Amino acid sequence: MKTLELKAVQNNAKIGKSCSDIEPNILEDTLFVEDGEVIGFYIRTVNDRLKGLINIANAEFLSDRVPKQEMSRGPQGTKAQKLERAKNDAQLVTQYSTILGGVPPKPHMRRPYPSISQVHRVKTAQNFIKAMMLACKESERILADIAPKIYIQQKNIVEKNIPKKWRFGELFTSSISNFNIAAKYHRDAANLKGCVNVILTKRYGSVGGNTSVPDYGATVDSCDNSMLVYPAWRNVHGVTPIRPTKDGGYRNSLVFYALQAFSGYN
């Protein structure tokens, strides 16, 4: 595995700004090192066990068995308007997301306490949930093998701050599956400091959708069955535009993360 010493570079990325088309420059298995410390890594193709779990989770997620929050870029309009756009090859890019595990409190939405995602109560979603949990556990095993110091640190932070009822696996509180969502530049400020995210990617017939960290001039090739481990609270980052190259092309990211919002809620 290659070792990359991360070095700060000047950039004009601002939170809330869309990430432009940037060609990936991290294309092979890589350890990310800053000031002599390993802070994350990238695996271009995960092992067969994790690949199988990702494939199951992705297939279930794409089915109508799993509830999703849906949105699309552009106005929906009437059925006639949709048909007219289809004739003109002006299809909307459909976007979905589904959260598993802990959902933080949101007082402005009259939800003053944390909860477990309602998806867990949907019978048809159980295979998806099981596959995601097993993928989470296999990701944790890989993390422990490649970056044991990160694994131990995160396990200690989560055990100290997060009651068991709010944990997803050992190292996280939550998971989100993002279908065709090219996130604008942001920092995961709500995450537990000192913890990493795991991002698993499934894609078909599409280009783009690569994770970019402008502070280091680093853009990761988010190819099919890849795994990115990174402390998303540390730096501004975004996802480059996703463009289908085939009918039905997409990019789906399966993410595990630890939120600080559950600290103190037993």
Image (spheres, rainbow, N blue to C red):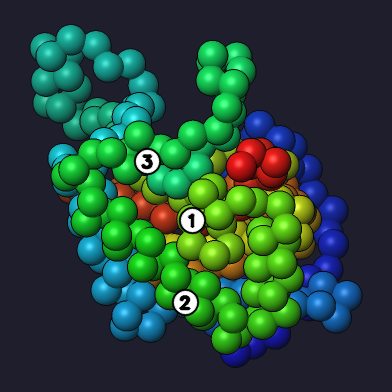
At a point 11% along the width and 12% down the height, the residue shown is 80
Q: Is residue 126 above or below residue 226?
A: above
Q: Which residue is mark 1?
A: 168
At a point 53% along the width and 20% down the height, the residue shown is 111
Q: CA distance from mark 2 to mark 1?
A: 24 Å
Could you say where residue 88 lies in the image, as x and y percent from the top left?
Answer: 18, 26
At a point 41% along the width and 45% down the height, the residue shown is 100
Q: Assign a secondary structure to mark 1.
A: loop
Q: Assign a secondary structure to mark 3.
A: strand
Q: Quadrant of the C terminus?
A: top right
Relative placement, left or right, of 254 versus 193 is left
Kindly identify which numbered label has been placed on residue 98.
3
Mark 1: amino acid:
Phe
Q: Assign a secondary structure to mark 2.
A: loop
Answer few, some or many: residues within 10 Å of disc 1's Cα (few below 14, many 20 plus, some between 14 and 19).
Answer: many
At a point 36% along the width and 68% down the height, the residue shown is 134
For discs 2 and 1, the disc positioned in front in the rendered view: 1
Kindly identify which numbered label has been placed on residue 44.
2
